[in-house]
Amino acid sequence: MGHEISGQIIEVGSSAKLYSVGTNVTIYPLIPCGECLACQKKEWVHCQNYSYYGSRRDGGDQEYLAVKEWNVLPVLEGVDVVHASLTEPVAVCSHAVNLINSKKGDKAVVVGAGLLGVMTALILKDSMNFDEVVVVLFLAGLENTTIPIQMWVGLREQLSPTIMAVATCLIIMSTLILVSAELLRRRSERLRGINR
C-alpha cells in the first residue's frame, strides 16, 4: 500500500527540467542509492541500499508527496490518472509474463486470485501464446477477496484434465505447507511453554 502512486504535479523544484505544473504523472517507487556496484551498472532493481516510496519512506497514502524527478513518469494522454496508479503492479505482472519461455498454444496456471494474480492472468490471456489460462482461487481467502467470481470464471475456457490436475496439485501442496507451518508454530509454542 502506498507505492502505487499517481497524481498531478502542483509544484516543481528549481532543478526540475522535465516536467511542469499540471502534468499528470505516476511514480516509479524505487529509489536506488546510486553508489553500490549494482547502481554503477545501472541495475537499479539490484541496489543494495535502496529506499522506496510507500515502504521505507512516505508514499501515496497522503495528499502531497515530494518526489525526485528521476522517479516521475508522465501519464499517457487519455489514461485516467486514477488508473495510472496501477502502473507499478501492471509492470510487475508484465515482467513476470515476459520471463516465461512460452510458445503458441501453451496453457498457464496462476495461483492466487488477488489483484496481481488476476492482472497476471489477464496479461497472459491477452498474450498471443496462451490458449488457456486458469486462475486457482483459494477458497480459504474467498470471503476477503474483492475480485468478482465472474472475472475468474471468465478467464477459463474449457479446462483440460492436465491443467486441472496441475491446479489441484498446487492447491494440495499449498494446503500441506500451510498446515505444516501451523503445526510447527503450535509445537514451537508448546516447547517454549515447557522451557519456561
Image (spheres, grey):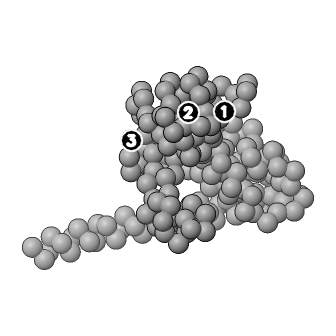
In the rendered structure, find residue 58 and report the number of the disc placed on it: 3
Q: Residue 51: where, in percent of width, then height?
A: 43, 54
Q: Which of marks 2 and 3 is nearer the N terminus?
A: 2
> Which element type, helix, strand or loop, lies under badge 2?
strand
Up the image or down, 106 lies above or below 10; here it is below
Q: How crowded is mark 2: few (under 14 residues within 10 Å), some or many (20 or more)?
A: many
The Cα atoms of the two marked residues, 2 and 3, are separated by 14 Å
- Labels 1 and 2: the sequence-earlier one: 2
Instruction: Give the x, y percent position of residue 27.
Output: 55, 40
Asked which quadrant contains residue 110, the reply is bottom right
Residue under the image location 48 percent in, 65 percent down: 35
**For residue 48, above or below residue 109:** below
Amino acid under disc 3: Asp
Secondary structure at numbered mark 1: loop
Identified by mark 1, the residue type is Val
Q: Give the residue displayed 43% in from the left and 40% down from the top.
A: 59
Residue 150 lies left or right of residue 15; in this view the side is right
Q: What residue type is labelled 2?
A: Ser
Distance from disc 1 to disc 3, alpha carbons, whole Å, reads 21 Å
- Residue, disc 2: 6
Q: Let me know if residue 143 appears in the view.
A: no
Q: Which of 89 and 31 is in front in this view?
A: 31
Residue at screen point 13% across, 77% down: 195
Residue that badge 1 annotates:
75
Q: Is residue 118 above or below residue 82?
A: below
From the viewer's perspective, tell me whether residue 103 is left or right of residue 110. Answer: right
Q: Position of residue 95 (x, y in %)?
A: 68, 55
Between 148 and 90, which is closer to the camera in this rendering? 90
Say few, some or many: other residues with alpha carbon within 10 Å of mark 3 (under 14 / 14 to 19 / 20 or more): some
Give the mark count.
3
